[in-house]
Structure formats: structure tokens, C-alpha cells
Image (cartoon, rainbow, N blue to C red):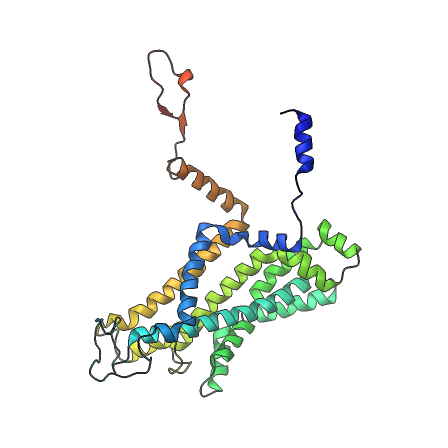
């Protein structure tokens, strides 16, 4: 192919679109690696259980069977029963809804506040930026769990929405600080300066120009807040701050501990909710690792190199690199074999 033909083909190719939706799509490329996909699959499994809990649960979580107290797993009760004959599987399924609702609601509240405070304080200058930064530093030192205990003690039965709101309001500061630092590096870029020179308003510069470039950090902040909110909810439920009639995995562990299930080794009561907490923690960690691998160029290149070596049948842990010599380079009287350098 001649150079003229190559130039003609290059001219006929359509340019890659650089629209808001194309930048937004490339921003979510962090969820296309194996770690993020695995984590999202596990998390999606728990979300589906939370949505269809009424359909999936074989019994009501409060249904009592006096003939099946402390019963181990059986064909009728797959995860056994409690001290009064309640089905453990039904309680775990219904408890998933409370965990998912609090985790995601707290993360949504915290992420919205972090975006508003972090991006605005990183873009503007002067006393507005310093004031928002000082507000962030104040919320960084506010202890979340003691505040939730104080708020919960003011209500006889605190709703999960209130608990999620307190977790979200006290958990946005770290995300805002990271977004502020990244926004301060973006505000001097050429495309931001061009948008400002064109007279675009502040809200459009932030929403259209900056947010697509901050999606990786926003997603990482969201995932971290979900993890912290779920751990906070289960911890508060286990120590009895949240009423035991509010179903989640922490209250199941609270009931099991109060009735001596740990001492009597009634594993079917406390092990399933513990494994669910561990599984959703693993899912969120995998998503966070996938985002970190996408954001960090060193991790991304190391992962791509490891996958390429695995495709070639090489061991990524080998300290010796295998070099395959061509047949023409083999000395006379010998065959071409693999040699190690």
C-alpha cells in the first residue's frame, strides 16, 4: 500500500467522538476488568436477594415453630432454626435488605456531599475554597459510631433511614478531600481553561467537563462508603444499639450471642450471617481493587503484563525469563531448544 493510499484512508476514517457521553463511557471502563466484574457479580447477587426477599424466603422471619427449636439444617429448614423455632435462612434473606438499603443510601448521601464540597472547593479560589476545606477537616475528626449511638438513643425504634443518614453525613469527608485535590489539578487543564474562556457557567464546567474525569475517584469513594456503612450497621446491631426487631445480619448475630449459640457451637445460627458479611466485604474489596488497578498506571501495566504472560503459558512468579531462540540461530549439531537467560 502506498503512502498516498494510506493518507486517503486516514482521511476517510471518522474521528473518534469527544462528547460528554463518550467521556462518561470511557470513565466507567474501570469496571471492565476481571476483579471489578467478579465483585459486581457478587454484589448484584445480594442486591437481587434484597429486592426479592419476600419471594425467596421460605418462611416469615418471625414465624415460630415450637416443634423445631435449635434444629440443625434439614430439608425443611436449610439453615436450621433459632431457640424459638424461627427459620435462620428466612432471617438472613430478610436481613440482606436492611444491609443493602443502609449501605447504598449512606453511600449515596456521602457521595453527593463529597462531590459538591470537594469539587467546588477544588475549583473555586479564595475564602470559599478555604472555608469548605475547613468544613471538611472538621468532619474528618467527628467520630461516627458514638454520634450514631447518641442519635439512636433518642428514639425508641430508630429507622434505618435515619441511621443511613447519620452514616452518610459523617462519612463524606475523606472522599471530599480526595476530590478536592484532584479537582485542583484539573482546573488548570486546557479544556477547563477553554470552557471558562467561552463563558460557560460553573455548574456546566463541573458537570460536563470535570465529573467524567473524576468518575474513578467518585466510584472508589462510593464503594468505600458502602463498606464502612455496612460494617457500621452490623456493628451497631451486634452491640444492641439498633433494636433487635430491625432485621439485618448484625441483629441475627446479636440474637445468637445472647442465646449462647457461640458457646453451644450452634454454627448454623451465627455462621451464615458472618459469611454473608465476609462475602459482601470481599465483593466490595474486589471492586475497589479493580478501580485502583484502572486508576494506577503501574498496577494496570503490571496486570496487563501478567495476563499476557499467562496466555503464553509462562509463570508470572518466575525470576528467570524464558527466551525462545529461532531455528536458524541454533549451532550446528544441536537442535533448537528453549534456553534460559
Residue pictured at 56% horizontal, 71% vertical: 109
Q: Quadrant of the C terminus?
A: top left
Pick whichever, 135 or 266, lies toward us.
Answer: 266
Using the rendered view, name the quadrant where residue 240 is placed: bottom left
Q: Is residue 246 visible?
A: yes
Q: Is residue 45 left or right of residue 193?
A: left
Query: Residue 66 placed where, x, y %?
Result: 22, 85
Using the rendered view, name the quadrant where residue 311 is placed: top left
Query: Residue 118 placed where, x, y %?
Result: 63, 64
Q: Is residue 211 left or right of residue 107?
A: right
Q: Reply above or below: 83 against 331.
A: below
Residue pictured at 46% horizontal, 54% vertical: 36
Pick whichever, 227 or 64, lies toward us.
Answer: 64
User: How many numbered dots are placed on residues in this image?
Assistant: 0
Pick whichever, 311 or 3, lies toward us.
Answer: 3
Q: Is residue 253 visible?
A: no
Query: Residue 232 placed where, x, y %?
Result: 45, 72
Residue pictured at 53% horizontal, 59% vertical: 220
For this orientation, the residue located farthest to the bottom is: 156
Q: Is residue 18 left or right of residue 273?
A: right
Amino acid at each position: 500500500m502506498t503512502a498516498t493510499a494510506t493518507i486517503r484512508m486516514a482521511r476517510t476514517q471518522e474521528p473518534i467522538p469527544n462528547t460528554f457521553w463518550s467521556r462518561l463511557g470511557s470513565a466507567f471502563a474501570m469496571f471492565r476488568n476481571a476483579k471489578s466484574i467478579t465483585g459486581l457479580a457478587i454484589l448484584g447477587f445480594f442486591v437481587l436477594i434484597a429486592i426479592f426477599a419476600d419471594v425467596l424466603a421460605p418462611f416469615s422471619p418471625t414465624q415460630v415453630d415450637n416443634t423445631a427449636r435449635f434444629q440443625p439444617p434439614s430439608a425443611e429448614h436449610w439453615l436450621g432454626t433459632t431457640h424459638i423455632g424461627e427459620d435462620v435462612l428466612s432471617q438472613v434473606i430478610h436481613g440482606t435488605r436492611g444491609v443493602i438499603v443502609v449501605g447504598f443510601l449512606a453511600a449515596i448521601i456521602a457521595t453527593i456531599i463529597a462531590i459538591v464540597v470537594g469539587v467546588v472547593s477544588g475549583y473555586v479560589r479564595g475564602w470559599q475554597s478555604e472555608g469548605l476545606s475547613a468544613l471538611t477537616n472538621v468532619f474528618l475528626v467527628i467520630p461516627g459510631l458514638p454520634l450514631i449511638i447518641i442519635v439512636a438513643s433518642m428514639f425508641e425504634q430508630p429507622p434505618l433511614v435515619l441511621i443511613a443518614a447519620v452514616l452518610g453525613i459523617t462519612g463524606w469527608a475523606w472522599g471530599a478531600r480526595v476530590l478536592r485535590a484532584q479537582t485542583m489539578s484539573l482546573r488548570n487543564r486546557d479544556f477547563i481553561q477553554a470552557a471558562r474562556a467561552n463563558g460557560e457557567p460553573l455548574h456546566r464546567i463541573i458537570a460536563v467537563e470535570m465529573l467524567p474525569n473524576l468518575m474513578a475517584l467518585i466510584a472508589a469513594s462510593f464503594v468505600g462508603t458502602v463498606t464502612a456503612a455496612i460494617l457500621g450497621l452490623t456493628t451497631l446491631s451486634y452491640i444492641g444499639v439498633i433494636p433487635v426487631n430491625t432485621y439485618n445480619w448484625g441483629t441475627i448475630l446479636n440474637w445468637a450471642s445472647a442465646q449462647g449459640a457461640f458457646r453451644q457451637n450452634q454454627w448454623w445460627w451465627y455462621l451464615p450471617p458472618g459469611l454473608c458479611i465476609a462475602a459482601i466485604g470481599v465483593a466490595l474489596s474486589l471492586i475497589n481493587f479493580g478501580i485502583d488497578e484502572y486508576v494506577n498506571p503501574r498496577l494496570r501495566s503490571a496486570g496487563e503484563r501478567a495476563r499476557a504472560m499467562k496466555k503464553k503459558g509462562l509463570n508470572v512468579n518466575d525470576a528467570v525469563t524464558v527466551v525462545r531462540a529461532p531455528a536458524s540461530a541454533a549451532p550446528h549439531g544441536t537442535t533448537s531448544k528453549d534456553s534460559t537467560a
